[in-house]
Image: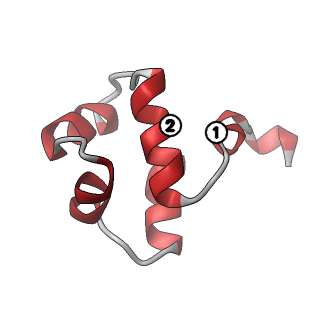
Amino acid sequence: MLWLKIEKELMRQKTSVYRLAKNTGIKQTTLQNYKNGTEPSFKNMCKIADALDVSLDYFRETEDDK
């Protein structure tokens, strides 16, 4: 579910996982692990949220919250 939100935001911003990796300093293989279900550390979630210019709360929202 988390990766779907990241992917949705990447598509909305018309950017790539490669660019996210460059902007965060997180290796593409690590991002791939997140896509495969590994939970990111809080530190990496902060980096991702900052790079995508979204609040950490964005990743906590469920479809029911909207």
Q: Position of residue 38 (x, y in %)?
A: 33, 23
58 or 24: nearer the viewer: 24
**What whole-number distance in Å separates the C-alpha atoms at marks 2 and 1?**
7 Å
Residue 18 to residue 34: above or below: below
Indicate the secondary structure of the residue bearing disc 1: helix
Q: What crowding class fits label 2: few (fewer than 14 Cα within 10 Å), some (14-19), or many (20 or more)?
A: some
Residue drawn at point x = 47 percent, y = 34 percent: 45
Residue type for callout 2: Cys
Query: Does any portion of residue 49 appear in the rendered image?
Result: yes
Q: Which residue is mark 2?
A: 46
First reached walking from the N terminus: tag 2 or tag 1: 2
Q: Position of residue 58 (x, y in %)?
A: 68, 45
Badges 2 and 1: C-beta atoms under 8 Å apart?
yes
Residue 12 to residue 24: above or below: below
Q: Quadrant of residue 11?
A: bottom left
Q: What crowding class fits label 1: few (fewer than 14 Cα within 10 Å), some (14-19), or many (20 or more)?
A: some
Position of 59 with respect to 64 (left or right) is left
Residue 31 to residue 50: above or below: above
Indicate the secondary structure of the residue bearing disc 2: helix
Residue drawn at point x = 62 percent, y = 39 percent: 59
